[in-house]
Image (spheres, coloured by chain):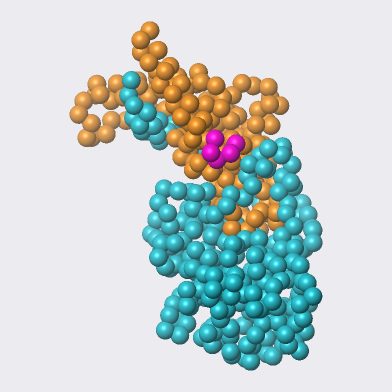
Amino acid sequence: MAAYEELVRGHQAVAFRTAYLITGDASEAEDAAQEAFVKAYRALDGFRSGAPFRPWLLAVVANEARNRRKAAGRRLGLALRAAGESQPADVPSPESVAVAAEWRSELLRTLETLREEDRLVVGYRYFLQLSEAETAAALGCARGTVKSRLSRALGRLRERMVEDAAG
Amino acid sequence: MRPDRDLERELRELGSRLEYPPTPDLARAVRSRLDAEPAPRRGWFESPVARWAAVAAVVLIAAVPVLSPPARDTVAGWFAGGQTSSGGQAGGGAGEAAPAAGGGQALSEAGSDTTTMMESEGESRAEDIPSSGGVPPPSAGGPGFGERIPLREAETRLAGREPLLPEARGLGEPDEVYAGGPSRNGGVVLVYGAGSGLPARDDAGLGLVLTEVPGSVGSAYLGEGGLDVAGIEKVSVGDGRGYWAPSGGRHLPSALFWERGGLALRLEADLSKREMIVVAESVR
């Protein structure tokens, strides 16, 4: 049991954040991740030796989180915000820092307008830096689908950024 | 508009600046819950050793990538040639590093019922192959051994290499040979019954298990799990390197890993380190 506790400790951050991207609510994300770890433990004897643990775990986590969100009847939102900008010493001017910060806020706002599957594939790959296999597991799609879905999501994000800039 | 590559870079940059709620201490909460309820008991998993082995297998796969970089380098470096299937690859998480995704998709699509992941591991088909010696036959395969084959077929399974046999303790030819276990594509498992100074483990009658897989120790075993990294010690086997894992066996308590003749070998028994090395050095 101590070994499993360590295993949980090693993965609790990514599990919690994966759930949080789905639920947009910290306490629901906590419940989902906790339940997922308990279910994963009970299912360990079915876990194929040699298979990577993290994608499997994230599939359980995402499933739990989706169920909770459905039960709550809420629309998914990323519910994220960028950290306050601190100015690193090597940045030449305060203006460029402000511009960069504004750009990031705009990017996040635009991302929020995309549909759920687009937001999630971007969130998993770029925010949580999950691998393709992990992203596929969390999305519940085939690994080959991740690339095309990501490419489509990026395309839509670009389009909307252009539209916003134009109008 | 900037090309996608810039957008990707900016998204990563944005990702690194995002604020999440603090991660709760799930480890403690999960442990409390699991401690409070009896674990489901089924078949092979009834054995505490087996449950431990399953957890250890996962812990290994999962733990290596999250070690601090120097520790990761050390562990990866132990297994020659950068062929480690876990933790040795930059950038990829465990997901990309280890072989064959474990059915996460199927699980995800199966609703919240994680029990759909259950597999009947190691359904051995002990056909009418007679045991080669007078030693009582060990367990009929046991979990993870694969399909029982005659010894003469082992060479085919080892891509044309003759299986290596231990000579110490009068071991010689194995009592049973298996191939095609659920977790590996190639290789054979030579099984020796208890007796001849080999202590038995429980009632299974298993005395010694020698697994032979073409390739390196890293490629053959590290990603497979069952290896307790924390307890591993480097040892010499003949004039080569070996790794002693006192609690790293899958079928028997201890394991010794080494390479010889293009094969990655794993010897499992309930013997001391010195005794295991003697057996390993007699394998040829």
What x and y, as percent, mark residue A94?
Answer: 24, 24
Placement of B184 over or under A11, stated as above or below: below
Query: Does the rendering let one see residue A73?
Result: yes
Residue B196 lies left or right of residue B219; in this view the side is right
Placement of A157 over or under B125, stated as above or below: above
Chain B appears what colour?
cyan
| Nearest the eye: A85 or B192 | B192
Q: Main secondary structure of the magenta part?
A: helix
| Residue B79 counted in the magenta span | no
Residue pictured at 69% horizontal, 73% vertical? B149
Residue pictured at 42% horizontal, 84% vertical? B239
What x and y, as percent, mark residue B60?
Answer: 55, 60
Q: Total marks drawn?
A: 0
What x and y, as percent, mark residue B119?
Answer: 73, 54
Q: Which residues are magenta?
A: A141-145
Say which chain is orange.
A
| Nearest the eye: A131 or B130 | B130
* Residue A65, quarter of picture: top right
* Residue A164, quarter of picture: top left
Residue pictured at 79% horizontal, 58% vertical? B41
What x and y, as percent, mark residue A63?
Answer: 65, 36
* Residue B130, quarter of picture: bottom right
Residue pictured at 64% horizontal, 47% vertical? B103
